[in-house]
Amino acid sequence: MSTSGEVSTSGTVSTSGTVSADRNGSDPILVVEGLKKYYPVRGGVLGGKIGEIRAVDGVSFSVRRGETLGLVGESGCGKSTLGRALNRLEEPTAGTVLFEGKDLAHATGKELFSLRRDIQMIFQDPYSSLNPRMTIGEIVREPLLVHRVGTRAEQVEKVRELLEVVGLAADTLERYPHEFSGGQRQRVGLARALTLEPKLVIADEPVSALDVSVQSQVLNLMVRLQRERNLTYVFISHDLSVVEYISDTIAIMYLGRIVEVGPVETIFERPAHPYTRALIEAIPVPDPRQKHEAKPLEGEAPSPVSPPPGCPFHPRCPFAIDACREVIPALEPVGASEAVGAAGTAGASDVVGASELVGVSELLGVSERVGVPGVAASEEDGGREHLAACIRKGEI
Ligand SMILES: Nc1ncnc2c1ncn2[C@@H]1O[C@H](COP(=O)(O)OP(=O)(O)O)[C@@H](O)[C@H]1O
Ligand code: SF4
Ligand SMILES: [Mg+2]
């Protein structure tokens, strides 16, 4: 079956494989399937390949036009690599990235050049991402020069308009990045990202380097721009509370994979995956009268060079049972009392526990169980048990 997951859902999806950000059935603008990015690890006397870093390890999701997919996870889980692979700043090792139906992962030459025009990036560090030797006017205008859009006068006019749109004064044009604060620089980054009128903006930790008060200003600006321009965002952050503010859908990433996805309110009200729960519990509570105390996530994320077998979260999971060390749980709709429906199953995953979840197979269109290659029947049973345990212990 298809793993793209263009099925509407109001539940959350707990997974180690495939996810969907679709919610109300309209066509997604971005459909990512089985995306992988491995980096070689070199060593030895001859500097040959001795291993690989599985930075992104088979990620699938889709995003609807005009919506925001928030991508969250701890540092090193592969968020930036995934963001860069989406517009080919990184060459994917495998998988497809369909943008408006065209495969960006395999596009070349003119096609890639023109696809890139529609997909822009904003980066975390507004200090290093702007060339210190260029004026703000030159920085914002540069994409128009590269893509040969408009006459000089039209380009300058466009730059003026954009600086105004992001709330910067007209005299900003002739000034240099070092003359501005972090928040102002990030506004410049936004103006530059919008110069070519993109459809999709991938924002990689865009407010993480900013003071909290400035963060909300930049987030508000991003929300307004999205509404006015019908932009689609992939918003990457290690901070679940920032992502909560801006996202329609949240995808939780752990060790190169997406482990849960769902509408923002469902993720917060009824998180299914123990890792999602741990991330939510780790959010600091500003109000001292609240009973809930932030519980920092224990243990370190394992290395993507030698990920643990089975569920990659098992060394840190309070609910782990023996089977968790052997079988990776597959994407499964959870919260079966809701109108669930979601992405399909990744080829490398086992549809465990499908029979426990009412109507899941029908909703998914799964006509048969998909086994993990090399997993014997008895392990599949263990798999069923362990997903049931995962869900049961999560009190779902
Ligand atoms: N160019 C690279 N070469 C080798 N390893 C890399 C490279 N970029 C990232 N990695 C590794 O890939 C993993 C994911 O990194 P990254 O995507 O930056 O995570 P995040 O953005 O979630 O912090 C990390 O283990 C990181 O060390
Ligand atoms: S219960 Fe098992 S499968 Fe579920 S998150 Fe914990 S270790 Fe992973
Ligand atoms: Mg990063």
Image (cartoon, grey):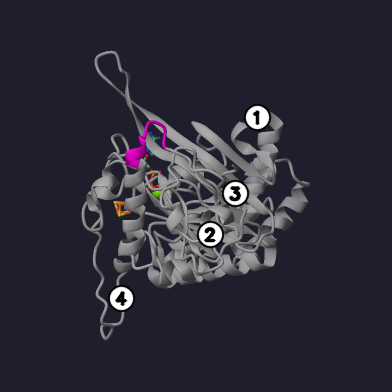
Which residue does the image show at 57% across and 54% down from the upper left? 362
Name which residue type carries label 1: Thr
Q: Quadrant of the C terminus?
A: bottom left
Q: Residues within 10 Å of mark 2 (few under 14, many from 20)?
A: some
Mark in the foreground, 3 or 1: 1
Give the alpha-carbon distance from disc 3 to disc 4, as whole Å.
34 Å
Characterize the magenta stretch by its predominant secondary structure. loop
Q: Which residue is mark 4?
A: 285
Is ligand 2 within 8 Å of the beta carbon of the residue shown at mark 4? no
User: Residue placed farthest to the bottom in the image?
Assistant: 289
Q: Earlier in the sequence, mark 2 or mark 4?
A: 4
As drawn, 85 above or below 237: above
Q: Position of residue 190 (x, y in %)?
A: 57, 58
* Residue 146 in view in this figure: no
- Secondary structure at badge 4 equals loop
Residue range of the region highlighted in magenta in the rendering:
372-379
SS state under label 1: loop
Instruction: Identify the residue position indicated by label 2 in the image.
Output: 359
**What residue does disc 3 label?**
120
Graded by Cα atoms within 10 Å as few (under 14), some (14 to 19) or many (20 or more), the crowding at tag 4 reads few
